[in-house]
């Protein structure tokens, strides 16, 4: 019924389960197996190895992570489905965003990340070796320390000098730089649209994003 599922947030020490329905519409029984081509190590997949003609059921996708794990951020998995030794046209993929366990956090004194700008426009990139940068201010508008858990960029051309072990005290701010490296732009014939994801221990918005655009010349 689907070849992709986004699980959303998964807190440390917890488990998320989803079901994807299937039906063998052929007149014969089929043999099924899956081969991982990209794995996070957090996903467990359950399904039968043989499906009879006309039989329906569910592929069970189960993500879980230990409470003491040091992993934060986006976990992605891609599995290719092999039916009677023939690879299916489309793979099965899933992803989850791993964050802190917020069960025992006090909502009143919780940290709160405020980003000064959520959209950075670099404009024209005139030379293939140009490096451009803009400053962004991160403010902790909550009542306890804000911990930066992970930083992710959707493009190798975009970096941010936030450190993953950075902490911002309650009521304090920190200036960071977002940089564009023109030499790393993969497609120089189209506008660059990328995002930086910041994962923190803010229980209301554990992941926030900064959108970045540029126009290669």
Image (cartoon, rainbow, N blue to C red):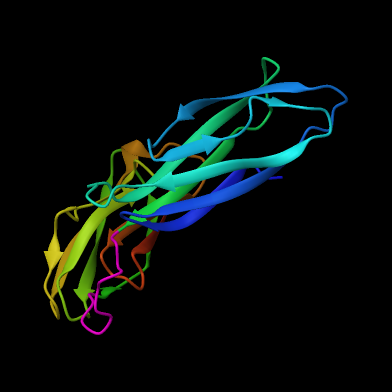
Q: Is residue 110 left or right of residue 48?
A: left
What is the x, y in percent for residue 147?
18, 63
Residue positioned 33% across, 51% down in the render: 73
Q: Quadrant of the C terminus?
A: top left
- Say which of 140 and 30 sits in front: 30
Q: How many marks?
A: 0
Residue positioned 23% across, 56% down in the render: 149
Q: Quadrant of the N terminus?
A: top right
- Decide: is 120 above or below 88: below
What is the x, y in percent for residue 113?
27, 72
Confirm whether the magenta stretch covers residue 102: yes
**In this view, which residue lies farthest toward the bottom?**
108
Confirm whether the magenta stretch covers residue 119: no
Quadrant assignment, res 55: top right
Quadrant assignment, res 196: bottom left
Residue range (magenta) = 100-111
Residue positioned 65% across, 32% down in the render: 90
**In this view, which residue lies farthest toward the top?**
85
What is the x, y in percent for residue 195?
40, 55
Q: Is residue 67 left or right of residue 32?
A: left
């Amino acid at each position: 019924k689907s070849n992709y599922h986004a699980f959303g947030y998964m807190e440390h020490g917890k488990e998320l389960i989803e079901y994807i329905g299937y039906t063998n519409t052929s007149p014969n029984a089929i043999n099924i197996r899956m081969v991982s081509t990209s794995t996070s190590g957090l996903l467990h997949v359950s399904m039968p190895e043989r499906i009879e003609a006309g039989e329906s059921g569910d592929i069970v996708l189960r993500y879980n992570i230990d409470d003491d794990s040091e992993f934060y951020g986006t976990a992605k998995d891609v599995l290719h489905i092999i039916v009677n030794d023939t690879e299916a046209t489309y793979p099965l993929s899933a992803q989850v965003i791993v964050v802190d366990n917020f069960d025992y956090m006090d909502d009143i004194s919780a940290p709160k990340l405020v980003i000064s700008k959520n959209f950075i426009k670099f404009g024209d990139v005139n030379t293939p070796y140009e490096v451009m940068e803009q400053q962004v201010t991160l403010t902790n508008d909550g009542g306890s320390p804000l911990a930066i858990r992970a930083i992710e960029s959707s493009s190798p051309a975009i970096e941010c000098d936030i450190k993953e072990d950075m902490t911002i005290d309650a009521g304090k701010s920190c200036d960071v730089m977002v940089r564009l490296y023109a030499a790393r732009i993969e497609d120089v014939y189209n506008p660059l649209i990328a995002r930086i994801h910041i994962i923190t221990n803010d229980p209301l918005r554990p992941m926030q994003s900064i959108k970045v655009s540029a126009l290669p010349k």
